[in-house]
Amino acid sequence: MAPLPPGIRFIGSFSRDQWYRAFIFILTFLLYASFHLSRKPISIVKGELHRYCATLHEGQVQFNSWNQKASGAPHRQPADNETDCSWAPFDQDNYQQLLGALDYSFLCAYAIGMYLSGIIGERLPIRYYLTFGMLASGAFTALFGLGYFYNIHSLGFYVVTQVVNGLVQTTGWPSVVTCLGNWFGKGRRGLIMGVWNSHTSVGNILGSLIAGYWVSTCWGLSFIVPGAIVAAMGIVCFLFLIEHPKDIACSSSLAAPKGCENGTHRFRLQKQVFTDDKSKPLVSRTSLRCLAEDPELQCLLLPEGKHPVHQSHVVVLPADGGGSMAAISFTGALRIPGVVEFSLCLLFAKSVSYTFLCWLPLYITNVDHLDARQAGELSTLFDVGGIFGGILAGVISDRLEKRASTCGLMLLLAAPTLYTFSTISKMGLEATVAMLLLSGALVSGPYALITTAVSADLGTHKSLKGNSHALATVTAIIDGTGSVGAALGPLLAGLLSPSGWNNVFYMLMFADACALLFLIRLIHKELSCPGSAAGDQVLFKEH
């Protein structure tokens, strides 16, 4: 018999469960990357909606951009007393406030809708809910671009389009996080979700490149093409997304521990779990459960010198996986330890991240004197840094088992880095490149960790007693609160930038300090009680 080819041996080395899990990982990654791909064009097109042209001899006008508008495209000639070649209504002196209103309308609608989205998402099939959101988001993203082809100059049209788009995009985050949480247990959750959360940066990079390709010639396509991509991914979602591993008889954890039947039974300890050599009980909980969906509850991680539980002390009960439990209420989710603190921290951390998302290309245009396409391409370096920052935060938090402390350290380093960025970026392109990478890593790291691993930890907190319906609501509360900051940050940047970009950076540094402040109690708890992370997975001695 001939030996199997190496490629076939490689494929056969993975189990059916592992292949399905990898498929869901990649699919949810691409689905949410497409959401971010559709959010990026507005920041790229800002430099084209309001741009300056130089008045030459004999009243001729020369544009600063590399390319002229496509032949026959709508074009506004400057007035006699203007050297501005902008797209009305963004041709006014208050154009920064008007452009900020576009960001604010989207993000404010997104923040409000997020609180409702998680509650609705728990009560509807994830696949249908997410598919609807992606198709609707693709339609309204493309609708914004149609304003170019139909020569629409109404501010209300663009604001309403942004508001509706913000509402329908709230279907995305709770859905993909819940789906991923269903498929992956808590083992190495920080690393897994750190890598997975790079979809944010990947989507931003692709969105910048796609929008930048057409921004100087036909900016309407900068919206229509991303909109078509989101809608196409919505169809892929409908055809292929598997909401829960039990739907195809797969296990729901990375590795089922001994003594915990995989998806069939759950075990309840009826007596003390273990004793030391002097027969003194160390665990007071007589109903500690070892769930197949939560292999890290440490029911089998016995300290050295302790005796394992006797078989007669274990009662096998039918597994429900939380499926028969009612969905958690909004106030019930707020009572989970850590939800309020991390939500408020994310409010300020996300305001910093989204200020960069919305205003960085325009800042680069003003400071480094680049056109819209060049600024859009250069701004992708911030997202490249964000990829490494998210993965690094996940690895460190997994290794230390301290989510809050990891976020706090990166926030502490981010504030002086932002100040350095505001100073050095004016010294040349090389300095801007270096600071974009570093700032991206430190700003995006805490944001990525809180919205993924921390949210999943809290959504599967032991106080929920295995209720799998809580994850979407907890995720929506945390990300919804963060989205309030995401709306306020770009709005304040639009109001402060006319007085100087330094004031914008001072605002961002203040936001980082506030984010760190809300984590102080959790950081103190982690440092004083090693092992108590966001999931609160510790065993306490009896008092």
Image (tube, helix red, strand yellow):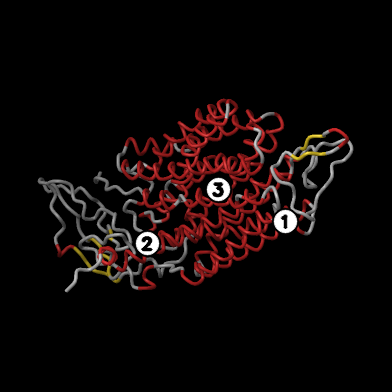
Which quadrant, please, contains the N terminus?
bottom left
Residue at 43% x, 36% y is 408
**Residue 384 location, x and y as percent?**
48, 43
**Left or right: 284, with 428 as reference point:** left
Which is nearer the N-term, disc 3 or disc 1? 1
Q: Which corner quadrant of the image does residue 355 belong to?
A: top right
Please name the residue that numbered disc 3 is placed on. 481
Q: Does residue 489 appear in this view?
A: no
Which is nearer the N-term, disc 1 or disc 2? 2
Is 364 situated above or below 138?
A: above
Please name the residue that numbered disc 1 is placed on. 160
Asked if the residue at tag 1 contacts the one at tag 3, i.e. Cβ–Cβ closer than 8 Å, the answer is no
Q: Residues within 10 Å of mark 3 (few under 14, many from 20)?
A: many
User: Which of labels 1 and 2 is toward the front?
Assistant: 2
Q: Amino acid at mark 3?
A: Thr
**Left or right: 138, with 255 as reference point:** right
